[in-house]
Amino acid sequence: MKKRLIAITFLIGALQFSCTDTFDALNTDPTKASGATFDANLLLPSIQWSYVNSTAGYNGPILFQSMWAQVLASTTSGAANYYSNGDKYVISSNTNSYLASTWNEGFKAASFAYEMEQLTKGNAAQVNLNSIAVIMQAQCFATISDTYGDIPYTQALQGKAGTSLPVYDTQESIYKSLLSRLETSIAALNASAALPTNDAFTYKGDVTKWKKFGYSLMLKLAMRMVKADAATAKSYAEKAAAGGVFTSVDDDAYVLADNANSYGNGNGAALSTLADVYQVRWSKTMIDYLKANNDPRLSKVAEVPVDGLTANQDFASGGNTTASAQLGLPNGYDLNGQATDISKSAGYPGGTGAGAEATPIGKYSRPTQIYRNRSAPLFVLTYAETELLLAEAATRGFTVSGTAAQHYRNGVAAGILSLSKYGTAAAIDAATANAYADAHPLVAANALKQINEQYWATDGMLMNNSEAWNNWKRSGFPVLTPVNYTGNFSSGQIPRRQPYPTTEATLNTANYQSATARLSSGDNWISRVWWDK
């Protein structure tokens, strides 16, 4: 990946500064590339990397959504107080920077995708790259909008054309446009045309897999809308299912990070930081769910550190992964010695170590070493998510091939198998995955709860925290008890959106004000986006 991105820099430099004898070239703006002078394939990995980076690490989701959705928890004291944003909904010194990162990185990815679209527009030989550019724009815009609500869309990415103050489109209009554009772009994909050559997904330019990705994304966006526009949701969910979505974990869309070349996994970077590896634990909500269901992933994802402060702060060593030993940290507690000190929580197990080695949180489960790998995968969309969404679509009476029970079983097994993307230490064999799925069938009377709890748990364990939070907002499952910590910014409610970056109010004032006027309670953490009913 590093070589690809460096190549873009060098090529742009060459386009800007090389000289020529020809009159035509002298009268060509050297700051503007065209499809004839710039290989648009070079933009694809930049799109993909910027997108996954927008949903990882300190760019927001691990600090916010992982704990809002009670996937992770933290006592957020001392050096790791930046987790107060997520675990207790309390402002930290860098909150404004954190809340802007998904916006900035997401629009960066979308801008690369838009540029790739423009460079390949009207070029029949580059129809696949052009279509992928649109598909990736849909992925980017949907994630940004899911996080903030109404955003610039029709006038976004138009800086070269002179539009520096874009209007904010409604999320409803954005979603309907994205679904329409997805339908057109997926249909245009052509295995007989030139294939992408710089694909950072494991697809390696395989158009068949990109088509499945497009339809799976269409399904996800359609299902987001089930409570806001059931008719449109049904229509596009059925189109996606008929078109051909993911069919196995081999179709999972993810980017494998490359820390050696400066493209490190943001989640891995956070969870291998001394303060984080000590204070970030699995939430009680997550561990209780996994233990109650005897989930085979529990011993792969969770460990109780060796006794004592030193071992608890050591990210290079492992701990006890026995499933029965795992204990989740309740959200909303601290190490401050007052009423919200972890020692005051119900069922507090006591600490480990003594004297200078004492730690009050030593018996709580932390993420295992697989998550401290800075070259670990960053997930975009998975077969497990797709099957679980099909299970819900079938439950809601949408026309899809197969039953809700069949899709649910496939989704449960796939979620277990996808964990192997983290490496051999995380792998669980297919026999175990299938046996677990067969032993935990879908119960019709409890279907929506089962489906969406499994969706939440699977995304949480794959560190796709943005998706775990968004689907919780959409579905209401799992049922979570909010934290009401003193001084919180959300009136004791689990945040439903991130406020807009503070620069929007000062740099794009009129359009920002129009957008915030449409929010139910203003530009805050608890106003709901359009589809969040």
Image: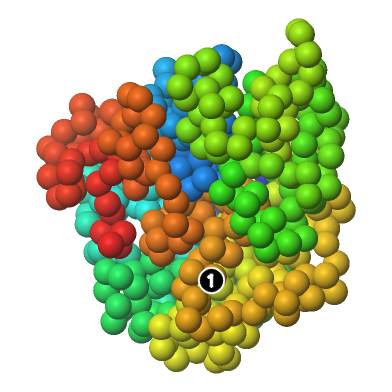
405 to 346, vertically: above or below: below
Q: Can you say which quadrant of the picture contains the C terminus?
A: bottom left
363 to 176, vertically: above or below: above
**Residue 88 appearing in the image:** yes
Query: What percent of the width, then of the height, locates residue 265?
Result: 67, 39
Query: What percent of the width, then of the height, locates residue 344?
Result: 54, 27
Task: Write down the quadrant of residue 393 in the picture.
Answer: bottom left
Mark 1 secondary-structure assignment: helix
Query: What percent of the width, then of the height, locates residue 146?
Result: 37, 53
Residue visible at 29% across and 82% down? Answer: 231
Q: Can you say which quadrant of the picture contains the N terminus?
A: top right
**Is 532 placed left or right of 382 in the picture?**
left
Pointer 1: residues within 10 angstroms few (<14), some, or many (20+)?
many
196 to 528, vertically: above or below: below
> Mark 1 highlights which residue?
451
Indicate the amino acid at tag 1.
Ile
Residue visible at 26% across and 59% down? Answer: 530
Task: Pick whichever, 3 or 29, lies toward us.
Answer: 3
Residue visible at 85% across and 74% down? Answer: 431
**Is 382 placed left or right of 310 in the picture?**
left
**Residue 53 appearing in the image:** no
Q: Residue furthest front?
A: 347
Task: Write down the quadrant of residue 316 in the picture.
Answer: top right
Query: What percent of the width, then of the height, locates residue 282?
Result: 63, 41
Residue visible at 56% across and 49% down? Answer: 285
**Is 162 placed left or right of 29 in the picture?**
left
